[in-house]
Structure formats: structure tokens, C-alpha cells
Amino acid sequence: MLWRCFSAKGPGRPIRVKERMNGAMYREILSENLLPSARALKMKRGWVFQHDNDPKLTARATKEWLRKKHFKVLEWPSQSPDLNPIEYLWSELKVRVAQRQPQNITALEEICMEEWAKIPATVCENLVKTYRKRLTSVIANKGYITKY
């Protein structure tokens, strides 16, 4: 599994997760990678962190950790993949990786990391800019997205 983050300024640092993730591992990944990614992307103060409602991501200990670190976290509706901009970026990565046809797990990992790093900031910026359109579309279509 690949932990990844991004902002309108581009993709952040991807992290390969080699075992099943739990809440403690998620907090460790955030601790070691979220701020370095934000700094590398030259994000200014006031940015908001968004993650989905997976139980390990919303566990009381994780919420408390984020609060103590003073992260602003976007409230997020449950089961809303159409709204999650990282899902669109994940699709972009899958297409790029498939085009390179990795032959084994090692090649897959290397190609994922290489292709993630090559995703243009403009793709990320567009996902952030079109976020409001996706929200409006989901509301207008009673919970479903048709196109953004």
C-alpha cells in the first residue's frame, strides 16, 4: 500500500506501507511525513488536512494527536469517495503505472514512486480548484457525481 498526500502545489512524499496499517502506524506516518511534505510543497500557514473516515484515521487517539499538533482537519462525510480528490489522483497514478507494465512487485513499487513524483502540480491544482464543482454536483445529483 502507498500512503500519499498532495496539495494544490503538487504531490507530496509517498510512503510505502509494508504491512496492514493500524491507527498507531498511521500516526507514525503522519508524524514522520505530513509536515515534511507540507514544507517540501512550500505550503503556507492555514492549510487544512483532509483524510477519509476510515476507523484507523478517525480513532480517538488519532484525533487527539492531530489536535495536539494543531492540525486543522476538514470534517468529512462517511463513504464519500466521489468527493475525495486523492481518489482522482490515485486513478491518475494507476493509469501511469499500467502503461509501464511492471513485471513484479519490486518493479511495481519503483514505478509507483517514480510516477507519483512525475505527476504535474497542475493536475493537483486542478483537483483542488474543481473541488467546489464536485461538491455541487454531488448535492445536485442527490449523492452521486456525474462529471466535474
Image (cartoon, helix red, strand yellow):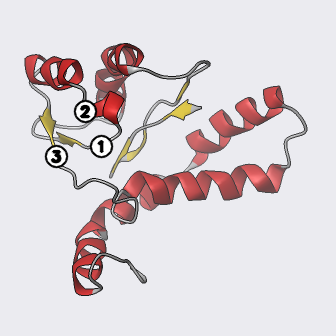
Real-space Cα distance between discs 2 and 3?
12 Å
> What amino acid does circle 2 point to?
Thr
Q: Which residue is mark 1?
A: 53
Which quadrant of the figure has residue 68? top left
Give the label on residue 130, or none: none
Please state which of residues 40 and 130 is positioned toward the viewer in this rendering: 130
Q: Which residue is mark 2?
A: 58
Q: Indicate left or right for 11 with 140 as reference.
A: right
Q: Nearer the viewer, mark 2 or mark 3?
A: 2
Real-space Cα distance between discs 1 and 3?
11 Å
Q: Which residue is mark 3?
A: 74
Residue shown at 20%/17% (left/top)? 61
Figure quadrant of the C terminus = bottom left
Counting every numbered tag in the picture gives 3
Looking at marks 1 and 3 on the same chain, the residue that comes earlier in the sequence is marked by 1
Q: Residues within 10 Å of mark 1 (few under 14, many from 20)?
A: some
> What amino acid does circle 3 point to?
Leu
> What amino acid does circle 1 point to?
Asn
- Dot 2 and dot 1 residues touching (CB under 8 Å): yes
Which quadrant of the figure has residue 38? top left
Q: Indicate left or right for 98 with 113 as reference.
A: right
Q: Residues within 10 Å of mark 3 (few under 14, many from 20)?
A: few
Disc 1 on helix, strand or loop? loop
